[in-house]
Amino acid sequence: MKLIKHLEELFNLAQANAKAERVGLPQREKWAKVAAFIAQTINSLTQAFDERAFDDNLKKLESLIEQAKAKAAGTGEAATSTTASTASQGSS
C-alpha cells in the first residue's frame, strides 16, 4: 500500500526530528507527538485492512462451503436415484 509506505517515511522523518539534538526541546516534543500520531494512523489503517481482508476471505470460504454442499447434495441425490432405479430393476 503506497499510503502506508508514505506514512512510514513521514514517521521516520518525524522520529528523526524528535531525536535530533539540533532541535530545541519544545520542537522535539512536537515532533514526537507527530510521530506518535502517524504511528497510530498506520496502526489503524493496517487493522482496517486486515479486517477487510479477513471479511473477504470469510465470504470466499462461505461461498466455497455452499458450493461444496450443493455439489454434495447433487451427488447424494444422484446416488439415491441410482439406488432406487437399481432396486426397481432388481424387482422386475
Image (tube, rainbow, N blue to C red):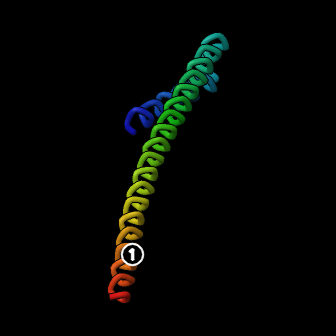
Q: Which of 35 and 37 lies nearest the eye of the viewer?
A: 37
Q: Residue furthest right?
A: 25
Please provide percent x and percent y for residue 20.
Answer: 61, 25
Quadrant location of the C terminus in the rendered image: bottom left
Above or below, 63 relative to 79:
above
The total number of labels drawn is: 1
Image-quadrant location for residue 70: bottom left
> Percent from the top left, x then y, of residue 18?
61, 23
Left or right: where 54 falls relative to 3 = right
Residue 10 versus residue 38: which sits nearer the camera?
Answer: 38
Residue 51 coordinates in the image, percent (x, y):
51, 38
Q: In terms of secondary structure, where does tag 1 sit?
A: helix
Q: Which residue is mark 1?
A: 79
Residue shown at the point (45%, 56%) measured from the top left: 65
Tell me where residue 84 sits by quadrant. bottom left
Q: Amino acid at mark 1?
A: Ala
Q: Residues within 10 Å of mark 1 (few under 14, many from 20)?
A: few
The residue lying furthest to the top in this view is 26
Q: Could you tell me which residue is drawn at 33 percent across and 79 percent down? A: 85
Residue 35, position as x, y percentages in the image? 57, 24
17 over 90 or under it: above or below? above
Q: Kindly identify the residue that appears in the image at 54 percent across and 29 percent down.
A: 44
Q: Nearer the viewer, residue 91 or 80?
A: 91
Q: Residue furthest front?
A: 92
Residue displayed at 39% across by 39% down: 1
Q: Nearer the viewer, residue 47 or 64?
A: 64
